[in-house]
Amino acid sequence: MKALVITRFGGPEVLELQQVPDAHPAPEQLLVKVEAGGLNFADLLTARGGYAGTPKPPLTAGREFAGREEASGRRVMGYTQWAAFAEKTVAHRNLVWPIPENWTAEQAAAFPVNFFTAYFAYWKAGLLNQGSDKAADARVLIHAVAGGVGTAAVQIGKILGIEMYGTSSSEDKLTRVSELGLQHGINYKQRDYVDAIKDLTHGEGVDAVFEMLGGEHVAKSVKCVRDFGRVIVYGAATGETPILDTRLLYAKGASVHGLWLSYLSANRPLMESAWKQLSEWLAAGKLAPVIGKVFPLEEARAAYILMQEGKNYGKIVLKIS
């Protein structure tokens, strides 16, 4: 079968379309004929060899997919650690979900990683009690708000009634995300977001920051929270090692929490609870993946480059078949 292979560790140039052995499911796995795959920053890190647990190359790329289950023919979307960007893939049956009836494969491939990550960010922040006083008065700062997780977080935040602030590199992106429900856009190229949050919240700060930039941004994000605020760290898109002097946490009783979907996905009760809520929102038509661009699998390198440059809006998707 045809697959996108990471031939060695490096940039997008290490990606090659190759013929690989057919996928065969283990007893707890399902075999899926893949139609589309969702590209994530974790895929960039995997290609570079910087993602924890990555096997030695060669290996098939991709961790998010949509297609049809071979045995039943039902349309499914799913999450796996490796090998999603291939004509066929396998995934644990607990990490495969039905595709909403009116969705394309491209939409479905853009759902699992972004929406589960965004959901768990609100969970880690303690803000999932829809309609509660805490959620109603809550403020959240979402970094890279125009990306896949960012646009998912805005949609969930709108459902929860949360005041949302978001950073991005362009006014155009911020305008588009505001149409999803973002109330306060911050162009970080024009203004330091720490100062912007201080002014916009009249010096109070936010309850939580969804942080995936790394480097200096962990410490800067801590400066944005109010008393007992939480910084939820789920990535390092800058490629820089996160920097934080923990003494910065003392004055506000602030805290920093890690979020790693690869780890959480092994917790079956937690994933089932998350899917129960997400599926209810899906059925009500309250969630929809935002797709920026779709590339054929043959142009996967260009897709990786676009993500690497940070110029994408929403999700980047690969059309597999």
Image (tube, grey):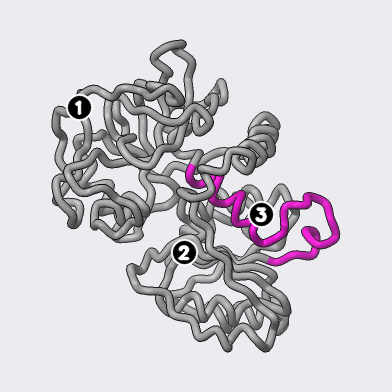
Can residue 184 be seen here? The reply is no
Q: Residue 2 has which mark? A: 1
Quick check: 304 left or right of 7? right
- Mark 1: which amino acid? Lys
Q: Is residue 127 magenta?
A: yes
Q: Does the magenta stretch include residue 252?
A: no
Few, some or many C-alpha atoms within 10 Å of disc 3 (few <14, some 14-19, many ≥20)? Answer: some
Q: Is residue 283 above or below residue 170?
A: above
Q: How far apart are marks 3 and 2 (CA)?
A: 16 Å
- Dot 1 or dot 2, earlier in sequence: 1
Q: Residue 212 has which mark? A: 2
Q: Is residue 16 above or below residue 198?
A: above
Q: Distance between the residues labelled 1 and 2?
A: 32 Å
Q: Mark 3 points at which residue?
A: 123
**Please, which residue is most extreme toward the top here?**
72
Q: Kindly identify the residue that appears in the image at 55 percent across and 84 percent down.
A: 246
Foreground of the two, 289 or 128:
128
| Magenta residues, start to end | 113-139
Foreground of the two, 253 or 29:
29
- Please, what secondary structure does the residue beneath circle 2 have? loop
Q: Quadrant of residue 197 in the image?
A: bottom right
